[in-house]
Image (cartoon, rainbow, N blue to C red):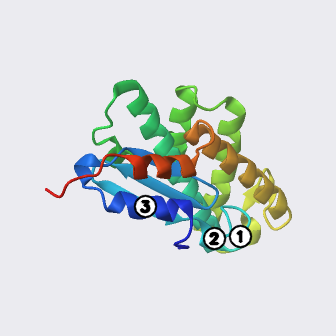
Amino acid sequence: MPDNSEIAQLYRMLSGIPTDRRPNVAILTNEEFLFCYKDNLSRMEFMRGYGPVEGLGFKRGDIINFFTQIELIINQIILVHLKAQDGIVLKFGQLLDCVDLFSKIKLLKDWDIIDRGTKADLICLKEVRNGFAHNWELKKVKYRGDSITQNFETFKSDSQRIFTKMLELYNGGPIDLTQLIADLRGAEPIANE
């Protein structure tokens, strides 16, 4: 992962703060993900630095990797939604690992986090993931009724649109990383305990 990004810098700063003093932070961008909650601090780069969809190729691994990222974002949207309502998440994250993607998408719609059109788009995209996972011949994989071999660019365009929408839902608006880093630097020093 590039160590010169603002998220990398933020990750290094958070790593140096005792877990009981770390702020709760969750940031998703087109290139990276940072999550800090209680004793959990993680950072990940999406799709080898090409953005979530730009580097998406007509390969089984790329499709599965892309949907792993979509599902991660959906999980985080659900957790943030619960935290915003209840103030605590408990061990719901563990439960999410046992829930299939369709049910997670349904929860987002049932809770009015996404609209009917977004739900339908996510389900169409999910069917491609299932097709790549369960069909040996890729020409049998369908997207919106046609072979994925014939309309991969449409799939890719729709994937970018939905990924962007998921990021917007998750982040709730633009995140000023420079200001966040400055705020952390200006915070009262933490004494070694």
Measured in 3D between alpha carbons, the distance from the residue under mark 3 to the one under mark 1, in whole angstroms, is 24 Å
Measured in 3D between alpha carbons, the distance from the residue under mark 2 to the one under mark 3, in whole angstroms, is 17 Å
Amino acid found under the numbered disc labelled 3: Tyr
Q: Quadrant of residue 150?
A: bottom right
Q: In which quadrant of the rendered image does the C terminus lie?
A: bottom left
Disc 1 versus disc 2: nearer the observer: 2
Q: Residue at x 28, y 38 (%)?
A: 90
Position of residue 138 relative to residue 16, above or below, is below
In primary-sequence order, the first of circles 1 and 2 is 2
- For mark 3, what is the residue? 11
**Left or right, 4 with reference to 14:** right
The residue nearer to you, when weighing 158 against 189, is 189
- For mark 1, what is the residue? 55
Q: Disc 2 on helix, strand or loop?
A: helix
- For mark 2, what is the residue? 49
Q: Residue at x 68, y 52 (%)?
A: 125
